[in-house]
Amino acid sequence: MSIEVKNISKRYGSQLALDNVSFSIKEGEIVGFLGPNGAGKSTMMKILTGYIQASEGEVFVNDLNLHISKNEAQKNIGYLPEHNPLYLDMYVKEYLLFNARIHKIPKSNIEKIIDKVGLTNESHKKISQLSKGYRQRVGLAASLLHNPNVVILDEPTTGLDPNQLLEIRNLIKEIGKEKTVLFSTHIMQEVEAVCDRVIIINKGKIIADELLKDLKENQEQLIEVEFDFKIEKQFIEKIPNLKIANNSYDTTWELTFSTKVDMRSAVFDFAKDNGLKTLKLNAKNKNLESLFRELTT
Ligand code: ADP
Ligand code: MG
């Protein structure tokens, strides 16, 4: 396993920021760590990278116990912290050289990394002159200098404009071809665009851990229908495959089906067979976004 988190809890004073968190990530996976602000994402990432210690539990990176073999384990980990702390007065290349020196990394790695993150034309510039997107590239470059095989990125796309966002997403996907990547975000679309798998955290607890393809397949179907008459719930429950019938307004119903087959014609037939007129009929497929909202509210 690239990453193994076993029963991690973290207390800040009396506050429980992580509550018995466990998950593992196989080599080569790109995993999105999704949760609203304050969920515990950064705390988990700081523990995973050895910056802070857990109150309870164990973490392994490439099968090395982070608590026991921290230095050895950290050689395998690239980390881009939240808010990407950079020395703005330094030139791009100078900053990366400086980082290489403190980590005793051969200078020869730097050109390769600069090229890989698309900084070749900016490498002579001061970091303060760069846009947010290019600053993120500098942070990514710094996290990759020692050629780690596990990369941990804390909200790498927050605050980027749409173009920069696409570029950084693509870069993360590119990095993910060679390395195990765990990146945090509070935006569901981010996960859909980049990941194989999503781990959802809320209030310090893992509430979902799924492959994206399974999430998409297990989608429920939501149909909104309006009839011309008010009807009883028992009556509407005769429609096959119906999981939940919610009388959202007067003669309007929100029907949840646990099937991928389009149920609109079945709803229409139900109305016709029972002498009702269908005034409105909408399929509203539940996407990951609504699932995430459901899970976190
Ligand atoms: P996220 O990254 O998902 O937004 P964090 O891990 O930063 O969440 O925070 C989780 C919870 O722990 C929050 O309630 C936050 O206020 C609290 N917290 C984080 N860091 C500290 C700290 N150093 N001291 C006290 N509380 C903290
Ligand atoms: Mg955070």
Image (tube, rainbow, N blue to C red):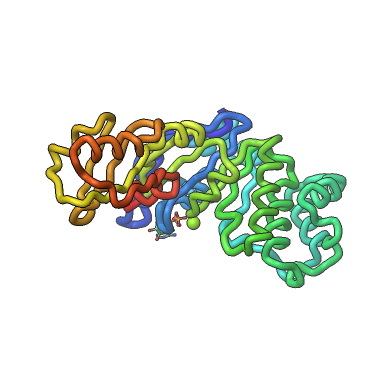
Q: Is residue 297 left or right of residue 227?
A: right
Front residue of 148/51: it is: 148
Give the residue displayed 52% in from the left and 50% down from the top: 189
Q: Position of residue 135 (x, y in %)?
A: 70, 62
Quarter of the figure with residue 235? top left
Give the residue displayed 73% in from the left and 71% down from the top: 128
> The N terminus lies in which quarter of the figure?
top right
Q: Position of residue 202 (x, y in %)?
A: 37, 49
Q: Position of residue 261 (x, y in %)?
A: 40, 31
Where is ligand 1, by quadrant?
bottom left
Quarter of the figure with residue 85? bottom right
Front residue of 179/262: it is: 262
Does the image show residue 43?
yes
Q: Is residue 282 left or right of residue 156?
A: left
Q: Is residue 64 left or right of residue 14?
A: right
Q: Position of residue 127 (x, y in %)?
A: 75, 67
Front residue of 73/247: it is: 247
